[in-house]
Image: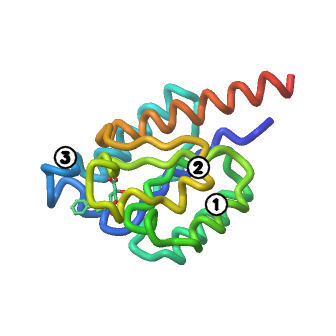
Amino acid sequence: MTSRLVFVLNGPNLNLLGKRQPHIYGHETLADVERDCRALAAELGLEIRFHQSNAEHQLIDWIHEAREIAGGIVMNPAAYTHTSVGILDALNTFDAPVIEVHISNVHKRESFRHHSYVSLRADGVIAGCGTQGYLFGLRRIAALMDVAAKKAG
Ligand code: CA2
């Protein structure tokens, strides 16, 4: 049976969620997002590890850890979305579903936010749905896990 453990990974500056720029990112803090993810995960029968880091190498290390034990990744790579071949390379070593989440609609913003290295690997991309996007990402991973489990018999 595939693991129902999902890593929810958050990139740089997301620790400031709800504390600055609420007109772009809303009023929820990252602790609120974690609480909502944990509540939904319990409903969906998922276990989650929820992490945030401002350091690219730490995010890559968590992806490596996920390779060994997780059945999916929901990731908001934040600014590294647009710059990091290292994170793309790490995700390319991960064999289970990856859902990329952006709180804001990056396509409505500056043109440098329109390109995502992570989208070259992601199985799904959610943008502009606010922090609800994390919950959509978890639901999608659970659905993909259910399909895979059915196929495996
Ligand atoms: O919309 C998203 O979720 C982003 O991934 C957020 C990143 C940005 O670089 C991406 O283009 C889109 C920025 C995260 C910074 O988060 C903050 C939250 C509150 C206050 C300041 C920054």
Q: Is residue 59 above or below residue 96?
A: below
Contact check, label 2 and label 3, Cβ < 8 Å? no
Query: On the rendering, which quadrant does ligand 1 occupy?
Result: bottom left
Amino acid residing under circle 1 = Leu
Residue at horizontal 54 percent and vertical 77 percent from the top: 57
First of labels 2, 3 by sequence position: 3
Between 15 and 96, which is closer to the camera in this rendering? 96
Between 142 and 40, which is closer to the camera in this rendering? 142
Location of mark 2 (residue): 122
Q: Residues within 10 Å of mark 2 (few under 14, many from 20)?
A: many
Q: Is residue 54 above or below residue 17?
A: below
Location of mark 1 (residue): 91
Q: Which mark is residue 26?
A: 3
First of labels 1, 2 by sequence position: 1
Contact check, label 1 and label 2, Cβ < 8 Å? yes
Establish whether ligand 1 lies closer than 8 Å to the Cβ of label 3. Answer: no
Q: How is the image coloured?
A: rainbow
Measure the C-alpha gap from mark 2 to mark 3: 24 Å
Residue that extends furthest to the right in the rendered view of this protein: 153
Secondary element under disc 2, as helix, strand or loop, is loop
Residue at horizontal 60 percent and vertical 31 percent from the top: 142
The quadrant in which residue 146 appears is: top right
Query: Residue 125: percent from the left, percent from the top?
Result: 49, 43
Residue at horizontal 57 percent and vertical 72 percent from the top: 85
How many marks on residues?
3
Between 59 and 127, which is closer to the camera in this rendering? 127
Q: Is residue 22 above or below residue 151?
A: below
The quadrant in which residue 134 appears is: top left
Secondary element under disc 1, as helix, strand or loop, is helix
